[in-house]
Structure formats: C-alpha cells, structure tokens
Image (cartoon, rainbow, N blue to C red):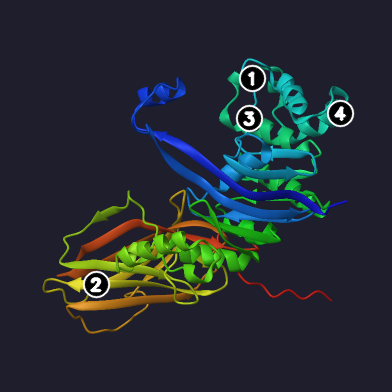
Amino acid sequence: MSDIAIHVQDVTKIYKLYDKPTDRMKDFLNLPSKKQRYKEHFALRNLSFDVKKGECVGFIGTNGAGKSTILKIITGVSNPTSGEVVIDGRISALLELGAGFNMEYTGLENVYLNGMMIGFTREEINAKLDDILTFADIGDFINQPVRTYSSGMFVRLAFAIAINIDPEILIVDEALSVGDVYFQSKCYKKFEDFKKQGKTIVFVSHDLSSISKYCDRVILLNKGQMIDSGAPNDMIDAYKQILVGQYDFEKSQVTNQMKERAINDIENSSKDWMSKLSQNPDMLVYGDLRAEIADYAVLDANGRISNSIEKGTPFSIRMKIRIKDDVKMPIFAFSLKDIKGTEITGTNTLIEKIEFETKEEMEVTFKQTMSLQGGEYLLSLGCTGYENGEFVVYHRLYDVCNITVVSSKNTVGFYDMDSEITVV
C-alpha cells in the first residue's frame, strides 16, 4: 500500500477573465469572433507535490498565490485545466464553511445532508450526531431553519459537521478562527487531536503562528507556482522576504520566466523603507509637518524589513525624520495596539530620557525584544514636542502598518513574562 495520501502532478488551473458580461455569454454560446474575448489568468501553473499519510502540510503565500485554488481542486470543488490529482483516503474539507447547506432546511437536516454528501450512511451519521451537536453547541436552534441563524451559529454548525465526521484526510482553509474565543479553543483542540491520531492534514492559513506550530512541512506558493518546500520556519522566513521584495528567486525552483518577472518587480520597486512593508491605506495622518516622518521600517532579528516578527527575538522600529522649521527638541514615539484598538505598549524619547542634537535630517531606532503574544498588532508613529509649555504635534501616523507576531507558544494575556519554572 502506498504511503502517499495526496498526489498532485503538473496541475494547471486557468480562469477566463472577460471585460464584459456579453463577451462571456457570446463565448458560452460559441459565437464566432475574429479575436479572443477573454484573457487567461493562471491561478496555478504546473504544480506538483505529494502529501504523505499522517503528514500535516501547510500552504502559505501572498493573496492570489493559488492556495485556496489547489485545496478546491484536491477536494473536487473545482477541476484542474490540466494535470492529475490522486487521493487515497476519505476527505473532510473546511473550505467555504456551510457552502453545501440548504438555507430552508433545519440545522439537523443539514447535518444529514452534508454527511451524505461526504459519503456517509445515515447510520454512520447517527453514530456521530451527539458529537456534532455537542461541538456546535447551538441548543434548540438545531431544529430551526438555517436561514434564521446568526453568522456565528452558522459557522459553528458547519465546522462541527466537517470536523466530527471521521475523515482520513482533513483539508483546512482559514477555518480555525471562527466563532468566539471559547469555540476557537475547541477547534484547535480538535485539530491537535487529529494530528495525534496520525490523520493527514492539509492546512492553509495567514496565521503564521499556527503554520509554525502545527505543520510538519510547508509549501510556499507565489503567483500560482511552488517556490519551495521545507521546514515551517524556513518557509515562513522565505515568505516574509517575498512580502517585502527581498526574496532571491535565483535560488528557488521556479521557472526562468517567473524568475525574470519577480526580479523585474524588485528592481522596479521603490527604494523607500516603507514601500517594503504592507501598509494600512486607512491610516490616520495629522500634524503641522514642521517635522515630518519621511520614512519608517520594522526590522526583524536579521535586519530585514518585515511585517512579521518572531516572538522572543529582537526587532527594531526605525524612522527617518526631516526637520523643516525651528524645532528645538522633538519627541519621537511609537506605540502598538491590538486589532480591537486597545493600546498595548509604546514609548518615546522623552520617557526614555534620550539626549540628542536636533538636525535637519535625523534617524531614530527603537530596539527591543518581541514579548507580545502571537497575533496581529497595529503600529503608530509620532513626532511631537513642547513649545512655550504647549504640546505640539508635528507629525503622527496612526495605525500605519500591521505587525504580525509569529509564535509557537502563547501564554495568558498580552505579553509573555518568559517565566522560568522549577518543579521539585
């Protein structure tokens, strides 16, 4: 018996992009035309890999890399344009949760409907029913039409069905963050149980902490092609380089055509620090601009500009400042808040009692160790001061960019006290 659960060979997926709905209709009706009515978009291009039985493989990559597309092809939701996919084992998929639900059916009727679509008999579903209902925990709503459900109840039931049907292969696409914190905890516990049972798991997520924690191997995709495959932390590091245009495509396994395209993208990109970060288009900017934050960067432990920082490692926040007017003693500051807007931490040169000479062009660096828990945070930067006893804002950038903290161990609360524990 083969030890390969999923075999993907030379899979290509091409979508037709039409400028007008009428062009789509004409093409569907096969009406004659002197020119092609659509453009071809390669969502996947000659993708090949194997997933061994009992292996947990993660997929990472930028938006449009092809992650969700390959999962849809593996599960049979979508067909490849060319190539071959061979599956050895029964699949349960957490893709678009509830995609197979009938909105007029009750939750209970949808449990049986989805179970039978996966391939289970009514007797097999009956045996799993208590586990499904307990996991979903939606009470009497199980006997109400799904159209009356809140979005939270909807995803709880969909998740409960998919994960409590005993599959040999579990496919997960950004589905471990549904519901409230207690339900998420149950989801992760179930996911860990699957790993301990030796189930085959294919996992797509933008949560790099989860990728690092759960995956045995990670496949890095970019623009529909596999860039590399290897240990989770190595691939996360490569992904961070792609995000900021610093990845060396010459060392990867992609085609020459893609190498040339990627290298041109890098050469044509801006040389500013901030251009290498994923920035918030809705940042709040204000101040009189007599002193201006001209550039900024977040640097990881290796000195690379990146939105992702590994927990427990040193990192820096850097700003370039241009002093345009008679500003005597500017105060440089940064702060971090969570995605709910709660201010977590921050400091400034006044608090830290930093002395310096004010010049027309200045550079300030805040260096520290990342002790925050794994998750998403928003960075704000500021240049302020006091004039004649009055507080003055020269330039503030609120929520200028995100910082993703990558962690394989999260303790309680906002930050890790890095406790040393002795048991005797």
**Residue 344 seen from this side:** no
Q: Upstream in the sequence, badge 2 or badge 4?
A: 4
Most foreground residue, 201 or 280: 201
> Is 16 left or right of 416, judged from the image as shown?
left
- Residue visible at 61% across and 69% down in the picture: 417
**How many residues crowd around disc 1 within 10 Å: few (fewer than 14), some, or many (20 or more)?**
some
Give the distance between the C-alpha atoms of the residues marked 3 and 1, in whole angstroms: 9 Å
Name which residue lies at 27% across and 60% down.
396
Sequence-wise first label, 1 or 4: 1
Residue 23 location, x and y as percent?
Answer: 37, 26
Determine contact: label 2, label 4, CB under 8 Å: no
Q: How far apart are marks 2 and 1 (CA)?
A: 58 Å
Label 3, secondary structure: give it.
Answer: loop
The amino acid on which the numbered mark 4 sits, given as a three-letter code, is Glu
**Measuring 55% from the left and 52% from the top, which residue is drawn there?**
206
Question: What residue type is disc 1 on?
Answer: Asn
Q: Earlier in the sequence, mark 4 or mark 3?
A: 3
From the image, tell me which residue sits under label 2.
321
